[in-house]
Image: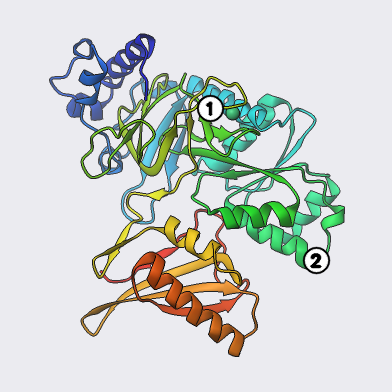
Amino acid sequence: MKMTEEMLSQVRGSIRHAKNSAFYQKHFEGIESDDIKTLDDFRRLPFTDKDDLRGAYPMGLCAVPTDEIVRIHSSSGTTGTPVIIPYTQKDVDDWAIMFKRCYETAGITRADRIQVTPGYGLWTAGIGFQLGAELLGAMAIPMGPGNTDKQIRMMIDLRTTVFTATSSYALLIAEEIEKRGVRDQICLKKGVIGSERWGAKMRKRIASELGVELYDIYGLTEIYGPGIGINCDMSESMHIWTDYMYFEIINPKTLEPVKDGESGEIVITTLQKEGAPLIRYRTHDLTREVIEPCPCGSDYPRIDAIIGRSDDMVKVKGTIIFPSKVDEFLAGVKDASSEYQIMIDHMNGRDQMTLFFETKLKPGAERQALEKEVEQGFKKSIGILAKIRAVSIGELPRSEKKTTRIFDNRY
Ligand code: ZN
């Protein structure tokens, strides 16, 4: 993306500051911030990846004296060493300012009541939604995840107007409200749905079942947390807060910048972070920059909704499979819901792929015919023959965190 002279000077400042950390002292050995005179110089800097952050465990990223740290967060890793991100008071405040800006971009005001269902704790999600709501002056209802009975009861009794969740938890709540027939007691107007890839079909379903406007919020624990970008009323692309971060889009294979507007991986450099500044951090999230100015008039640049992760791509029998492609394919199948899972196994010397998807159709001839239709359509649009298993609505797990769609059991 465009880099102004002012940003370039902020980048230099960030590099100078980052080199106070044990990690960047080593990672940027021999690199002086004053050597970075142009965007091209900047693009020659080495990337920082999640494994680097793991290697810096526990406090190797810390670029200030530790008594200036007021909080730590840790990014969710299913395996191995966690990543610890230390925050100064300014980092916490900046995050709240960005989050408030997200709410405002979504037309949320101090009159709103915001029910926060993402988790609290080491994971950054819940507390970020809370901070932004309080700074805005709205009423925060800090539920955290789970306990659907209580969620719905609070939603009714406290007249919640804004619901914040992961897409899969939003779907679960929408289904429960439908099942209990309490929709006319719900005052929801908007949903802010956090940072995971979700297809158009799922979005439509949550929006129509809850009867709300949905907003897609972006972020990751390594860079503050959720709240570093959100879509506005005029567009489904997300505005990003480039006064705090510089965004690049690179080709994840060649690691070169893509052409303007092409899809690639988001790489972020923090411009103001004190506790754990990151330079050219590879997010592995895939999207593209939207070049056209937004009809809403905001000067903040836009990125499209996240289409997947560069490490979510799986290769089966020589074919690359992308969760977003499967979303798109299922969106076009009339009786298939947006929920699916793919299992990849290695059996009898061969890779075997099974697609499970949910349908309202009852077991029997109709469901079998649907499976046949999906098998042929899948082969045609994804390019691979898979075993197809239709299951009933609600049978596949809904997650309170991020939904995993593809399970690769081969290794
Ligand atoms: Zn806009």
Question: Which quarter of the figure is the C terminus placed in?
Answer: bottom left
Say few, some or many: other residues with alpha carbon within 10 Å of mark 1 (under 14 / 14 to 19 / 20 or more). many
The answer to whether residue 147 of the structure is visible from this angle is no
Q: Is residue 375 visible?
A: yes
The residue at 25%/39% (across/down) is 52
User: Is there a contact, CB below 8 Å, between mark 2 and mark 1?
Assistant: no
Q: Out of 318 and 383, give the one closest to the viewer.
A: 383
Query: In the rendering, which numbered label is found on residue 180?
Result: 2
On the picture, is 398 further left or further right than 188?
A: left
Q: 161 or 73, which lies in front? A: 161
In percent of the image, x 31 and y 42: which residue is there? 50
Mark 2–mark 1 Cα distance, whole angstroms, equals 37 Å
Ligand 1: quadrant of the figure: top right
Q: Looking at the image, is 124 positioned above or below residue 292?
A: below
Residue 105 point in image, percent of width and height: 64, 28
Q: Residue furthest left?
A: 30
**Residue 37 found in image quarter:** top left
Q: In the visual, does 218 lie left or right of 312?
A: right
**Which quadrant is home to the N terminus?**
top left
Residue at the spot of label 1: 95
Residue 98 or residue 63, whichever sits in front: 98
Under circle 1, the secondary element is: helix
In primary-sequence order, the first of circles 2 and 1 is 1
Residue 113: x, y in percent? 77, 38
Residue 40 higher or lower than 182, as above or below: above
Please tell me how crowded label 2 is: few (under 14), some (14-19), or many (20+) other residues with Cα within 10 Å: few
